[in-house]
Amino acid sequence: FGSTSAQLNTSQPKSRTRGEFYFTWGYNRDWYSHSDIHIYRHDADPAKSYDFMLYHAKAQDKPDMWRWWQLDRLTIPQYDMNFGYLFNDKNDLGIEVGWNHLKYVVTPYQTIHIKGEVHGTPIDNIQPLYDTMVHIQHTNGNNYLLFSLVKRQKLIEGKHIKVSAIAKAGVGPMISYTIDTIFGDNDSGYFHYHGMVYAASVGIRANFFKHFFLQTDMQAGFANYTNTRLGHQHLGISTQHFYSFQWTYELGYSFALGKK
């Protein structure tokens, strides 16, 4: 009995990996719901004042292309960059900070309902949206700075490959960059706070060669633009909200902090 007790007392608990950091880089395609856009500038001079709505405006992304030998164009297409930490606790939870560089272009020349007041004159027309009248594109871009909670669910754990499901829910500001034209007043854009975004995603992660992994996600988001500045003096404002759907494909690198 004494020998058995000694053996039990000297047994060691199974070691467990501490939390792990990871980084991902990848690209995306985006789709957007229609939205109502409120555009206004209140000025004492009626010739500079306007306040009108674009109803049910359509928009699209602008994927561009990156060629692997053109390193200076790495951030030209729509890209995603994420830094995260998995606690490796019993719930397999983690946290993540992500920069999602989507692009959003209000489709030019679409037939649209415009209603309101322009330079003191009422307007209520269904007409083409000429880009000399109104053109709005968040192409540098429609940027989501997301702070997310991450949940990992392990599916396959082999010797050389591990496959997991990944779910995220996050919120954060949009630090976007808008290029626009309002009645011939062109603005080349600048980065500023535009509003808030709320997003959730599900995806699959496949780990290989210990530290590397491939991941793909489907993300649904709600973007609430409340502070988009328009015109070269940034005196005009547009507000809108829309739903976005983003598909990403990413390469990642992870490293554990050791055993405990």
Image: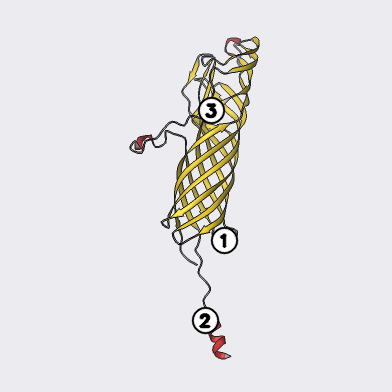
Return the disc, 1 or 2, that comes first in the chain's sequence: 2
Q: Secondary structure at mark 1?
A: loop
Q: CA distance from mark 3 to mark 2?
A: 65 Å
Amino acid type of disc 1? Asp
Q: Quadrant of the N terminus?
A: bottom right
Q: Is residue 233 above or below residue 166?
A: above
For image coordinates 44% across by 34% down, the residue present is 77
| Percent of width and height locating residue 65 | 41, 32
Foreground: disc 3 or disc 2: 3
Q: Residues within 10 Å of mark 3 (few under 14, many from 20)?
A: some
**What residue is shown with label 2?**
10
Point out which mark residue 89 bears. Answer: 1
Q: Is residue 132 above or below residue 75?
A: above
Return the disc, 1 or 3, that comes first in the chain's sequence: 3
Q: CB atoms at circles 1 and 2 under 8 Å apart?
A: no
Q: Secondary structure at mark 3?
A: strand
Left/right of residue 70 with respect to residue 186 in the rendered view: left
Left/right of residue 121 with respect to residue 25 in the rendered view: right
Return the disc, 3 or 2, that comes first in the chain's sequence: 2
| Percent of width and height locating residue 135 | 53, 20
Point out which mark residue 189 bears. Answer: none
Left/right of residue 70 with respect to residue 127 in the rendered view: left
**What residue is shown with label 3?**
60
Q: Secondary structure at mark 2?
A: helix
Q: Is residue 14 above or below residue 144?
A: below
| Percent of width and height locating residue 178 | 51, 27
Q: CA distance from mark 1 to mark 3?
A: 41 Å
For image coordinates 57% across by 18% down, the residue present is 110
| Percent of width and height locating residue 121 | 64, 9
For image coordinates 48% across by 52% down, the residue present is 206
Q: 24 or 119: nearer the eye? A: 24
Q: Residues within 10 Å of mark 2 (few under 14, many from 20)?
A: few
